[in-house]
């Protein structure tokens, strides 16, 4: 499987920008899809964005046009560039990887806090 380590979270004012990074290690050759999810206090974890090995992306409606996911396969790293941040974007952001060895697996990072002040 893979291990995921996020970085780049922090406190930002509304309208600002942040860039999250997620570095994967382990059996990175087996990763098919990487993505970002988030969980706000009292709410369920929700999809933010995903990206496949081929570069196809998918975004939650709430972040379309503001967030951009990208992937550096050579460095086994996925990024989430966030612009025009809103207070409702405040959450713990988790990196996710889905892959296939002789079994399908899903891995999660430990999460990074993003706080947007109004």
Image: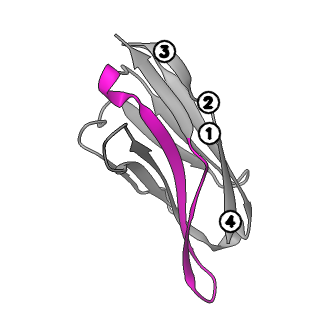
**Picture disc at residue 2:** 4
Where does the magenta region start and end? 87-111
Contact check, label 4 and label 2, Cβ < 8 Å: no
Residue 8, which numbered label? 2
Residue drawn 64% across the image and 74% down it = 30
Residue drawn 73% across the image and 50% down it: 75
Q: Are marks 1 and 4 in contact (CB under 8 Å)?
A: no
Please state the horizontal and vertical placement of residue 37, each as a whole percent of the image.
Answer: 43, 48
Tag 1: Cα neighbours inside 10 Å, few (<14), some, or many (≥20)? Answer: many
Mark 1 or mark 4, earlier in chain: 4
Measuring from the top left, give residue 5's x and y in whole percent. Answer: 68, 48
In this view of the protein, which residue sits in the foreground, 16 or 71? 16
Dot 2 or dot 1: first in sequence order is: 2
Badge number at residue 29? none
Q: Which tag, 3 or 1, sits closer to the chain's start?
A: 3
Q: Are marks 3 and 4 in contact (CB under 8 Å)?
A: no
Q: CA distance from mark 3 to mark 4?
A: 30 Å
Residue placed furthest toward the bottom: 102
Image quarter in which the N terminus is found:
bottom right
Q: Is residue 113 left or right of residue 90?
A: right
Nearer-N-terminus badge (3/4): 4
**Colouring used for the render:** one colour
Helix, strand or loop at mark 1:
strand
* Residue at (62% x, 30% y) in the render: 8
The answer to whether mark 2 and mark 1 are in CB contact below 8 A is yes
Instruction: Work out whether 47 lies above or below 3.
Output: above
Residue under the image location 54 percent in, 50 percent down: 95
On the image, numbered disc 1 is attached to which residue? Answer: 21
Q: Which residue is mark 3?
A: 12
Q: Please tell me whether residue 100 belongs to the stretch shown in magenta.
A: yes
The C terminus appears in which quarter of the rendering? top left
Asked if 10 appears above or below 104 in the picture, the reply is above
């Amino acid at each position: 499987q893979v291990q995921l380590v996020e970085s780049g979270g922090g406190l930002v004012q509304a309208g600002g920008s942040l860039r999250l990074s997620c570095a994967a290690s382990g059996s990175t050759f087996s990763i098919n899809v990487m993505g970002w999810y988030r969980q706000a206090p009292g709410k369920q974890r929700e999809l933010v964005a995903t990206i496949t090995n081929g570069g196809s992306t998918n975004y939650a409606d709430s972040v379309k046009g503001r967030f951009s996911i990208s992937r550096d396969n050579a460095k086994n790293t996925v990024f989430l560039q966030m612009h025009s941040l809103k207070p409702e974007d405040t959450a713990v952001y988790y990196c996710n990887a889905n892959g296939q060895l002789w079994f399908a697996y899903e891995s999660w990072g430990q999460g990074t806090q993003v706080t947007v002040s109004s």
